[in-house]
Amino acid sequence: MSGIDETLERRLHREALEDERQQLLLEVARLEGEVTALRDQMAALEAAEEHHRAEVEAAQLEAADARAAQRADQVRVEASHRLVAELRTRVEQADEARVRAENERAAVIAALGRKARRLLEG
């Protein structure tokens, strides 16, 4: 091989290496862009996950408050049922007392009527 051929070969080799280096640099830049995009996506996903976690915690607190309110309402409902039952019993007792009083009044009126007839007949 002549000196010109060697020089030309070295130059072609250097150019091929430079082309390969440029290709690798482009590939590295592309991969770095992907890494940056993936990091951004990861940060967005982590933020969304934290937001969802906070929403779940808030929903759990609301559910606990709702259960506590439901228990309090249930206690009030049961107290109302007892009061209604007691008032019904008292109404029934009052009705029974009224009927007894009416019967006693009717008996007294009947007895007074009999006495008045006897006095008038006598």
Image (cartoon, helix red, strand yellow):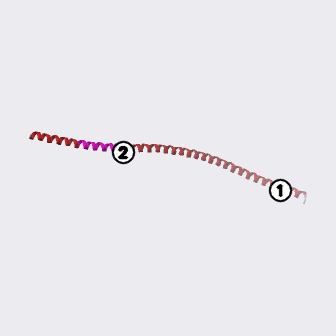
| Segment tinted magenta in the rendering | 86-102
Q: Which disc, if any, is residue 13?
A: 1
Question: Residue at (25%, 43%) from the top-left corner?
Answer: 100
Which x, y percent locates residue 69? 47, 43
CA gap between label 1 and label 2 equals 104 Å
Q: Nearer the viewer, residue 97 or 14?
A: 97
**Image spot of residue 19 (x, y percent):** 78, 54
- The amino acid beneath tag 1 is His
Q: Residue at x 36, y 43 (%)?
A: 86
Give the number of callouts. 2
According to the picture, the residue beneath numbered tag 2 turns out to be 85
In the foreground, 94 or 79: 94
Q: Nearer the viewer, residue 7 or 36?
A: 36
Q: The N terminus lies in which quarter of the figure?
A: bottom right
- Residue 26: x percent and y percent? 74, 52
Q: Residues within 10 Å of mark 2 (few under 14, many from 20)?
A: few
Residue 92's image quarter? Answer: top left
Q: Is residue 34 above or below residue 2?
A: above
Relative to the observer, which residue lies in front, 4 or 14? 14
**What kind of element bears circle 2?**
helix
In the rendered image, residue 103, in percent from the top left (x then y), is placed at 22, 43
Which numbered circle lies on residue 60?
none
Q: Going by the image, does 22 lie left or right of 110?
A: right
Q: Residue furthest front?
A: 122
